[in-house]
Amino acid sequence: MADNKDIFTSTVVPIMDKVRDDLQRKQADEYERHSRSWGAMMAGAAGPDGGMASLDAYNSTILYTGEWNTKTVEDYIDMVKAELKKKGIAVDAVLEKKMIDHLIHQQMPKSTVEYILRKAAEGTIFYLPQRARTSSLQDHINKEAERQYNPSLASEITGNILSWAANAASTGGFGGFIGQTILDLGVEGGSRIAPGQESEYLEKQKDIARKEVAAANKKKVTIPRWMLTQMGFERIADATDKQLGVAVQWAQSNADIYRKKVNTAVNNGSRTVKSHGDGNDMSVTDATLRAMQYEAYVKALKKEQVSRKEARKEEQAKASVITEAEETSIASPKVTQSVPEEQSSHNTEAVQSNTADTSSAPNDNILGKFGGWNNLLDAFGLSGAGDTFRYLGVTLANLPDMLLGVFTGRTKSIGLNKSTMMPLAALIGGSFIKNPLLKIPMMLYGGANLINKVGQESLAEYRQENGLTQPVRYKQYPNEELNARISNPHVEGNVLIVDIDHVPRIVTMPPTLADAYQSGAIPLNTLANHILAKTDQMQRIQITEQPSQEVARHYEQNQEREQVKGIR
């Protein structure tokens, strides 16, 4: 908004002054040509008063028939808009209001004497022809200037008395006091019924504002990112239940405020409102769009709340069902086609082994391997520096408490221990080294190391106090083609239900693996293929170990027989 003010002061106001000066010059030239015309000379020679009345009447015709003398303030505004368009400046509702406010400021009386004289002149019978030519916008400017000036009661009474005296002097006191009072009332009534009333301008503005609001309501809006960050989260799904409740209340309140501002502005015949917060002018179109953004935000937040409630109900309802299905499947799996007894028992063992050892499926590499950067950062004591500088505000806000905790023993990350000796030595050594090539790296290393340690400790306390968890970065697995031996895979909570070789299996996934699937790191097909591979691996291990187990069992049985024989 500061840029708009600078543009108005540096560009718009000079153009307004230039257009006004050009218009006044053209009006004066046109009036001068008209007053020197042949018709003016003939009118000046007629009449018993030496042609004064007829000449004045003739000269007044230019005010109704001239090209430039018939221009109104609306025409002046249009001329200014045309000049601004040449400069590449588009005039919206806010800029147009600034232009009208500028004219109102120029129209305001500069002193009490000026107001009294203007009030007295406007109340005389000689002002009626000029009042008849006043446009609705000009009448609005005149009345708004008087309202902003806010004259005293004594000034208004003085102006009315002077206008009464002027009318009495011009009519010779015709009709006495009563006649002059009736004359003043007639002048006031003529001013009120003359064309170009302020109410006409306000009605036009109301119609334009209603159309702008209706057009804005038909547009589609998106939720701006700053609304999310204003509430302390990047995505709606990352917000806690408490944050969702606070965000709904905040967004709904702001939406109601903007809707109320727009309705009030439209009813008052204004196309601009004051923005909530900074108080700058904004168009009713922008205010309507802002209200719609808040309303869309509220809708998205409430949808998330409803989704979470339904998910909790479904989890509670299915918890017992899933447990019962898991026990039934492990005890006696249902076979969709005839399976030999040996294969059925073998599959049952595979289900049990899958249920117990799924953690070694994709989960063993779930966090991904990212080259050697993590190891390098750990070596320099900068592990988790991304979170520290991402939430630098939390780190700096807790820095005084952490520094004080060094002396009280509350801060555990900084002290005379192995992890802080090197950064402290780097800071102390760097302060005595004059070579900048050594001084700057050592100071940066020491400071960044200590700030990171303090930041990690303060973030841990902050997350613990607010019930937040540190985000986990998972490796992204590609979506694989589903193995032909697998059919109907689907996940319910932390349970994978899948048919392997036409045998239903229920596999309980560890929390890390389930969270990786929910976050989209592992596609369903890839997860099912890894489960199948792990099942086959366990089967091969069992087949390989079975002969050795048989040999060991026979050996133990033979040893027992020999011992029994020896005893006998």
Image (spheres, rainbow, N blue to C red):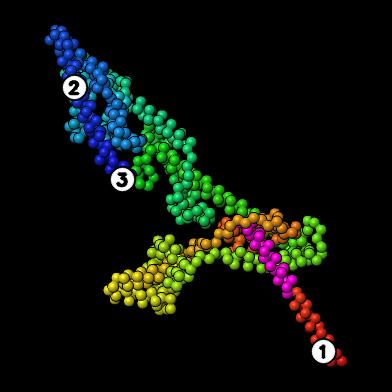
The earlier-in-sequence mark between 2 and 3 is 3
Q: Which residue matches tag 1?
A: 563
Specify whether residue 233 is painted magenta: no
Q: Is residue 30 above or below residue 224?
A: above
Q: Nearer the viewer, mark 3 or mark 1?
A: 1
Q: What secondary structure is found at the residue carrying circle 1?
A: helix
Residue in the foreground of this view, choosing between 486 and 50: 486
Which residue is depicted at the point 36% across and 77% down?
425
Which residue is depicted at the point 48% across and 36% down?
218
Q: Is residue 354 above or below residue 69?
A: below
Q: Confirm whether residue 108 shows in the render.
A: no
Q: Position of residue 45 (x, y in %)?
A: 14, 8
Q: Residues within 10 Å of mark 3 (few under 14, many from 20)?
A: few
Outermost residue to the right: 568
Which residue is depicted at the point 32% across and 37% down?
89
Q: What secondary structure is found at the residue carrying circle 3?
A: helix
Q: Which residue matches tag 3?
A: 2
User: What count of labels does the image hold?
Assistant: 3
Q: Nearer the viewer, mark 2 or mark 3?
A: 2
- Three-letter amino acid code at the position of disc 1: Gln
Cα distance between the residues tagged 3 and 1: 102 Å
Q: Residues within 10 Å of mark 2 (few under 14, many from 20)?
A: few
- Three-letter amino acid code at the position of disc 2: Asp
